[in-house]
Image (tube, grey):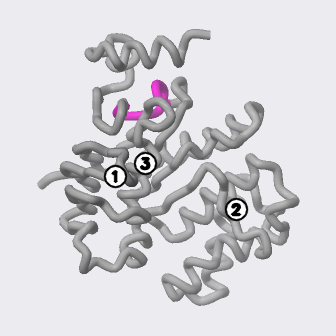
């Protein structure tokens, strides 16, 4: 029996005259951490948005387990219960407290009773060092704290997969580490993660597989040690050289 949790087959996405994704094939097994790397504009964020059904694909298919979720008959909101997505810009509701941000989806999407949802939320906030922030509002938190709340909010729905879209790119350098530490902990606990990132050291240390996107295609993928140390594609080597050279 296959361990594949996500399968992307021949995925294409166009905006106007621009082909952003040009036939992506990708498999993510249960409990894998897959880091998607590539230059800005290579299609990383669009790939995650297509997997989460925030974009309508132009061709190809995405499967979650044995279900084709890009089938137009599928309810996207139902699918997103199993796909927790965290964005680079936090996307917290500014008029809601941290606790209300975290409990909103469990209460109103999953139908969890308020007391149960709040109990689970408090447990998650404590676990990630935010126990004293439950009553705070987003504008009273640091960027790192806001992003950690966004991760907790995604986890509150107990998703099968966590999709992370450049979640450290809007943070000051000193705050990046605290967010990556949460992801490192989740990876160690067996969470299935697909992460678009420019954090090369993190990808090398934590990922099970690295996927290099270039101009909307998978140029190369493999174990981090092999991709970073012995890239097979000249384009991968050029990207890494430009990105990793001070």
Chain part drawn in magenta: 203-211
- Residue 189 position within the rendered picture, expressed as x and y whole percent measured from the top left: 47, 48
| Dot label at residue 68 | none
- Residue 165 position within the rendered picture, expressed as x and y whole percent measured from the top left: 52, 48
Residue annotated with mark 3:
193
Residue at 24 percent of width and 61 percent of height: 63
Q: Residues within 10 Å of mark 3 (few under 14, many from 20)?
A: many
Between marks 1 and 2, how big is the CA–CA gap? 39 Å
Q: Which of marks 2 and 3 is nearer the N terminus?
A: 2
Residue annotated with mark 1:
14
| Dot label at residue 125 | 2
- Residue 196 position within the rendered picture, expressed as x and y whole percent measured from the top left: 47, 41
- Indicate the secondary structure of the residue bearing disc 2: helix
Closer mark to the observer between disc 1 and disc 2: 1
161 and 20: which one is in front? 20
Closer mark to the observer between disc 3 and disc 1: 1
Q: Earlier in the sequence, mark 1 or mark 2?
A: 1
Residue 76's place in the image compared with 237, above or below, is below
Residue 6's place in the image compared with 70, above or below, is above
């Amino acid at each position: 029996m296959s361990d594949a949790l996500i399968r992307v087959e021949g995925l294409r996405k166009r905006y106007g005259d621009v082909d952003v994704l040009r036939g992506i094939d990708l498999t993510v097994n249960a409990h894998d951490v897959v880091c998607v790397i590539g230059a800005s504009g290579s299609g990383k964020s669009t790939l995650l948005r297509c997997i989460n059904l925030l974009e309508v694909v132009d061709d190809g298919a995405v499967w979650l387990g044995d279900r084709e979720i890009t089938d137009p008959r599928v309810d996207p909101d139902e699918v997103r219960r199993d796909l927790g997505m965290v964005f680079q810009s936090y996307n917290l509701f500014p008029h809601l407290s941290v606790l209300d941000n975290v409990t909103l989806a469990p209460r109103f999407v999953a139908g969890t009773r308020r007391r149960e949802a709040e109990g689970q939320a408090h447990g998650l906030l404590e676990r990630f060092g935010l126990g004293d922030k439950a009553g705070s509002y987003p504008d009273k938190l640091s960027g790192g704290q806001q992003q950690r709340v966004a991760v907790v909010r995604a986890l509150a729905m107990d998703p099968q997969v966590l999709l992370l879209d450049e979640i450290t790119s809007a943070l000051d350098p000193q705050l990046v580490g605290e967010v990556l530490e949460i992801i490192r902990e989740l990876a160690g606990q067996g969470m299935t993660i697909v992460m678009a990132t420019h954090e090369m050291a993190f990808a090398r240390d934590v990922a099970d597989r690295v996927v290099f996107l270039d101009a909307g295609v998978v140029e190369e993928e493999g174990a981090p040690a092999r991709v970073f140390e012995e890239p097979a594609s000249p384009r991968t080597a050029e990207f890494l050289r430009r990105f990793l050279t001070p």
